[in-house]
Image (cartoon, rainbow, N blue to C red):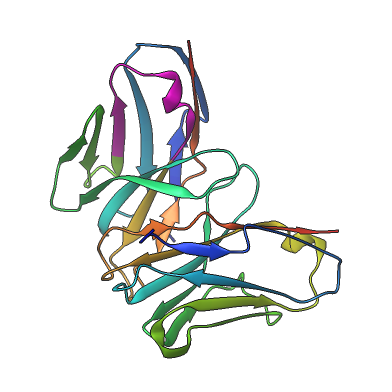
Amino acid sequence: DTGVSQDPRHKITKRGQNVTFRCDPISEHNRLYWYRQTLGQGPEFLTYFQNEAQLEKSRLLSDRFSAERPKGSFSTLEIQRTEQGDSAMYLCASSLTGDTEAFFGQGTRLTVV
Amino acid sequence: KQEVTQIPAALSVPEGENLVLNCSFTDSAIYNLQWFRQDPGKGLTSLLLIQSSQREQTSGRLNASLDKSSGRSTLYIAASQPGDSATYLCAVRDSGGSNYKLTFGKGTLLTVNP
């Protein structure tokens, strides 16, 4: 499978715990994006990487959130001290260049109880 | 700030009917517009990408048009099938800035009844 891969697909965690998600983009894509989607809404931009450089973070990304993309390959999104409001689908996307077609993964569904 | 609106929010049609989904955006300075399909609990599947210089794109039974100056796009689905039932999302990529992020509408939930 050469598409965007996300792991895990589902995560249930207790409030206050830390969680980490992984995204493996399409191999030749140097742009990688994280989005968050809540029920009934479209995805909202969280952060963007060009190769290993994190170039922009949304105001939605509080200081409890951190993302990395070591060596410009896979990316991780960590949420510290999770809150119930963090419950959402976290989507990863990649594209070859800034203005070419974006491909999304299957997402990670986070439930904070 | 770019805003994307999709109308209608939900649509139910009998199998075989042709249908049109609408998308409007407030800032016409875009690189391109992309239509996606999302099945319940799943990720997004790219359907069509229209560059700002293009008027339309076709893929099988799908045809997407773009009128950048008026800030509108339509997705036309011919001869709908129950398997087309899903949420359809429209997203624009702004030309301002350098991050090329997508701004999404809330989607249209399509149900095709057998």
Q: Residue at x 47, y 46 (%)?
A: B105
**Residue B79, placed above or below residue B30:** above
User: Percent from the top left, x then y, of residue B23?
Assistant: 37, 38
The percent position of residue B5, horizontal first and vertical second, equals 45, 42
Image coords of residue A63 (percent x, y): 68, 82
Quarter the N terminus of chain B occupies: bottom left
Does A84 sit left or right of A65 as displayed?
A: right
Residue A18 sits in which quadrant? bottom right
Which residue appears at 81% of the width and 67% of the height?
A: A83
- B37 versus A31 height, above or below: above
**Could you say which is closer to the camera, residue B67 or residue A94?**
A94
Residue A41, position as x, y percentages in the image: 58, 46
Which stretch appears magenta? Answer: B73-88
Q: Nearer the viewer, residue B69 or B87?
A: B87
- Residue B2 visible in this rendered orientation of the protein: no
Is B21 left, or right, of A57 in this rendering? left
Residue A80 lies, with reference to residue B91, above or below; the image says below
**How many numbered marks does the figure carry?**
0
Q: Residue at x 37, y 58 (%)?
A: A103
Q: Is residue A100 visible?
A: yes
Residue at 49 percent across and 32 percent down: it is B86
Residue B78 on the magenta span: yes
Q: Residue furthest front?
A: A1
Residue A15 sits inside the magenta stretch: no
